[in-house]
Image: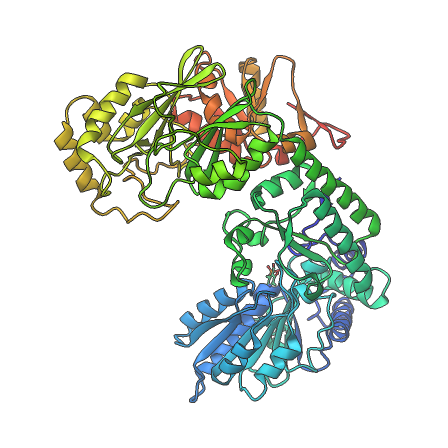
Amino acid sequence: MDIYLDANATTPVLPQAREAALAAMAEDFGNPSSIHGTGLKARALMDGVRDRARRVLGAEGGRLLFVSGATEGIQTAVLSALLALRDRVDRPALLLYGATEHKAVPEALQHWQALLGLNMQLLAIPVTRDGRHDLDWLRAHAPRAGLVCTMAANNETGVISDLDGIADALAGSQALWMVDGVQALGKLPLALTRRRIHYAPFSGHKLYAPKGIGLLYVRDGAPFTPLLAGGGQEGASRAGTENMSGIAALGAVLSALEDGRTFADAATLTGLRDQLAAALRDAFPSLVFNAPPALCLPTTLNFSVPGVSSRQLLDLFDAAELRVSGGSACSAAAARPSEVLTAMGLPAWQAASAVRLSFGPATDPAFIAEACARIRGCGQALRDSGQPVAGLTRFVVDGACCYALADTASRRAVVIDPLPELTERLSRWLGSQQLTLAAVLDTHSHGDHASSAAALWAAVGQAPGDVDALGWPHAAAALALGERSITRLALPGHTQDSTAYLLHDATGLRHTFVGDTVLPGALGRSDFPQSAPLSYAGSLQRLAQAVGLHGLLLPGHDEAGALATTLAVECAAQPLLAAALAGRLDAVGLAQAKAQLEQDLAPTRYQTLACGARVEPDRPADAVELSAPALRALFAAHPGLRLVDVREPYEQCLGLRPALPGSCVVEAVPLGGLPDALSRWLALPAGTPVVFFCRSGNRSAQAARALRRLGCVQAWSLAGGLALWPRAPASARDAALAI
Ligand code: PLP
């Protein structure tokens, strides 16, 4: 069973709302503009719902329009206000909106002011650390404001605005005031008419009504311009035949609000939220809540866990069929820090790893108890996944790569290119695997930041011993790591001290950590003061001699998610490299050509640095997605195909497991282990398909594309991931997935 904890994004439709909608479609289907009996019934229904909404919202006067949702309500309000402002001779200078407003508001302000040719200054009202508007700032700017937009409660944090404080700050100002009431509907008494609010938009689907129905309140006397003109519906305020099934459903929800039986009161909801908060603290003891609970809706929790990204937490929760959200739903596809939390002045890590848990007021205690049990299970799964990981693990921060090599027999590890952001995570990872550090190596000294090797040594409570500036033990020819060993190869060019580390195992050379000397689609730039451009060509030749054209190279940066590369692949993409290796460009020729290429390269910015001039054109992404039927067909043609589960161990132990025919080989290789596993798949008999799958299809598509780039044309990703994979009948939690 799904535990849906994303009510601030949308809610399911209440059973009585569903019934009301169906009745409005099947029986009372009239058009409220018709004057016959069927139409009159529809109008009576609509008028009844409007009256109920007026009572619930405290909107005794003014217009209360049925609209399609808050976004439409916001457009109508903004258009109305801006048109009135345009016509004023003494037009105020400012348009103000809360810095944590849903983006429908600033986007609408920008859009309509551009269309209307207005040139007012758009300013965000800052919020304090607790997420509330800075009222002193607002008071100071209110006299020059034409329109002020402030939400009643925030969708990401649940922070409730101090509407009376805002009204007070606006006292004496001529400004029109819009309050986005979306997250407050049914949760806070809004008293729209008593307060000086001019416009208030709402969406039904945030409170158990279907999508496509909403309300807009417009105060008596506030400027108004219809967004839609046409058949004169809603007193010519909003044309278009009314969404009667939506209105009927909304009416049922409003009835439920009035009858006091369906929705829990604030004290009960606070108790449920406290249970969730306690379960979260048990599961993730280091967690921090991102907004003060006392100032928030009792149905919303927003938190971050140090060292665990919101993406990781979402994957973990989703594997337990707990549906939560990272930041706001609209930006779920992009892994950007939450703008709301950034505006509140929270540290970058907190804004980038936030997770939101929200439930609706119709939630019952049994549901919350199950949610708490699953949350605790997630914490346990995360802790249990610290089992020893043999071999190589890659960690990535903003495209910069760090590698950790572990030998479980000797319990020793080597870290290559440590990153400061990873110090805590790596030291915890090493601790959980009971590994001691054998070496921390840098592939080059960085112009823009000091190596974080010292910090890592300090964090694990060890000392580096007698090592050189890049961390290599003085006088050692090789570093032994169980059955593996590492040697080094000087490759001056990107920097004078650039070095590759070659990893050997019983079968020979396995991987080469090349730092920035050869990157996917680029050669490392050599225009730094510490670069050695004239040495670059010789270094490339030496690298080719040592690793061959097909040896796997693991780069220091991997913006495009290539995972690994080879000189052969890069020669095809980079003419300069091909020319240098073929001897068509000598040391001076390569240095000159590189200098020309790099002359417009932006200065480096730490971790998002332009560490080389990318010459590989961005090709349209390979179509690697396989539908379920296509996978079945592929399997019939290639019974020996490989299936690779790229979910993290904690997801695998919580989540669905595919039930597959006996001959099907399934490997579990989480994202960090992919670079190490590539060589295994590349060594498979030609034409053997390798099909990756994960929860949603993103990570598996990255893996498939990376393998394709290395020449495996039969690399695929299961489209939509396990989320869309047809389940076996009678799906239990552990349901088998039939191929
Ligand atoms: N305002 C707030 C605070 C919201 O949370 C949302 C939806 O997430 C909206 C406006 C936009 O609502 P809709 O997409 O239903 O039009």
Relative to 307, is 86 above or below?
below
Most extreme residue toward the front is 466
Relative to 580, is 365 above or below?
below
Residue 139 showing in the rendered view: yes
Total marks placed: 0
Q: Looking at this view, is 403 or 561 the one in front?
A: 403
- Place of residue 95 in the rendered image (x, y in percent of width and height, measured from the top left): 48, 76
- Place of residue 71 in the rendered image (x, y in percent of width and height, measured from the top left): 57, 64
Q: Residue at x 44, y 43 (%)?
A: 398
Q: Looking at this view, is 123 or 632 the one in front?
A: 123
Q: Quadrant of residue 497?
A: top left
Q: Residue at x 73, y 63 (%)?
A: 250
Where, quadrant-wise, is the C terminus in this rendering? top right
Residue 694 showing in the rendered view: no
Q: How is the image coloured?
A: rainbow
Q: Residue at x 35, y 36 (%)?
A: 619
Q: Looking at this view, is 678 or 220 the one in front?
A: 678
Where, quadrant-wise, is the N terminus in this rendering? top right
626 vs 588, left or right, is right
267 vs 170, left or right, is right
685 vs 366, left or right, is left
Relative to 362, is 125 above or below?
below
- Place of residue 524 in the rendered image (x, y in percent of width and height, measured from the top left): 28, 36
- Place of residue 508 in the rendered image (x, y in percent of width and height, measured from the top left): 40, 12
The quadrant where ligand 1 appears is bottom right
Relative to 1, is 687 above or below?
above
